[in-house]
Amino acid sequence: MKDAVRAGFERTPLIEGEEIISRLGWRYAVKGFDPDRRVSERDWKLLEQAAILAPSSYGLQPFRIIVISDRDMKERLAPACYNQPQVRDCSHLVFFAARKEFTEQHIKEFLELTMEVRGTPAEDLSGLAEALENTRANLEKNGLTKAWAQRQTYISLGFLLETAALLGVDACPMEGFVPEQVDKILGLEEYTATVMCALGYRTGSDWLAPLKKVRFPADTIVTRI
Ligand SMILES: Cc1cc2nc3c(=O)[nH]c(=O)nc-3n(C[C@H](O)[C@H](O)[C@H](O)COP(=O)(O)O)c2cc1C
């Protein structure tokens, strides 16, 4: 992944604002994927990068992203996903799996990575280390660790969905699966499948494609103060 550049970033939008909205209006939760069309390697790499660039609590990324393009594996997973056709027909199926436990080891690895990437001395991170440990202990004490980790997965999903729309790749986010079954098939132990996303290209015959988007009016959703 290219280093993210913050200072001196060119602020001219890559595409016009209206174009972004029009792309987001183009996307819909695709039911009918063309089983013969694959997302290119290049686009796939960009999509993975977008999902990884999503923010997370403290930047801890308490989840894994499992990408399945193997046909046999999709076939095995389909019954655990209520046989939703997207699972078999998409180009790439992605599971976002949340960490079940927030361990001291995770904190250690995160601090080590921060020191390595930013060249920060350990002593400068002692405040962060303490905050992380407090957060960890609080989440554990209140039995909230899994829910906390699961929330992070949806942010990454959002980045993936938006980037897919901007690249002209179709997608369908899905919670319609049995986590215990999916975890077993994927051999997940420390993680649990939380949400999935099928990606690929819509067929011309998907009945949903021509339907208008249903959204409550902005004023009923947004409160401006
Ligand atoms: C968390 C989540 C879970 C969803 N689960 C499913 C699913 O299991 N199967 C499916 O076909 N669509 C699923 N959807 C798609 C929604 O039905 C769809 O996003 C919604 O109807 C709005 O339509 P649009 O995305 O086409 O604008 C899910 C969407 C989200 C965000």
Image (spheres, rainbow, N blue to C red):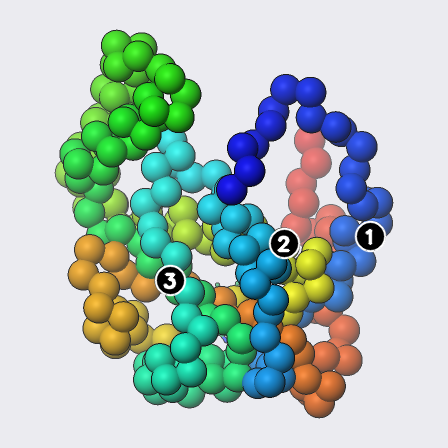
Q: Which residue is mark 2?
A: 163
Q: Secondary structure at mark 2?
A: helix
Q: Which residue is mark 1?
A: 19
The picture places residue 169, in percent across and down from the top left corner, at: 65, 66
The quadrant of the picture showing ligand 1 is: bottom right
Q: Which residue is mark 3?
A: 66
Q: Secondary structure at mark 1?
A: helix
Is the shortest distance between ligand 1 and the CB of mark 3 under 8 Å? no
- Look at 34% across and 54% down and name the residue there: 64
Residues under labels 1 and 2: Cα distance? Answer: 13 Å
Considering depth in this image, is 11 or 140 the residue closer to the camera? Answer: 11
Q: Is residue 165 visible?
A: yes
Q: What amino acid is labelled 2 in the image? A: Thr
Residue furthest top as drawn: 123
Left or right of 145: which side holds 213?
right
- Look at 76% across and 59% down and name the residue there: 23
| Callout count | 3
Q: What amino acid is labelled 1 in the image? A: Glu
Left or right of 90: which side holds 15?
right
The 10 Å Cα crowd at callout 1, few under 14, some 14 to 19, many 20 or more, is few
Is the shortest distance between ligand 1 and the CB of mark 1 under 8 Å? no
The picture places residue 57, in percent across and down from the top left corner, at: 39, 36
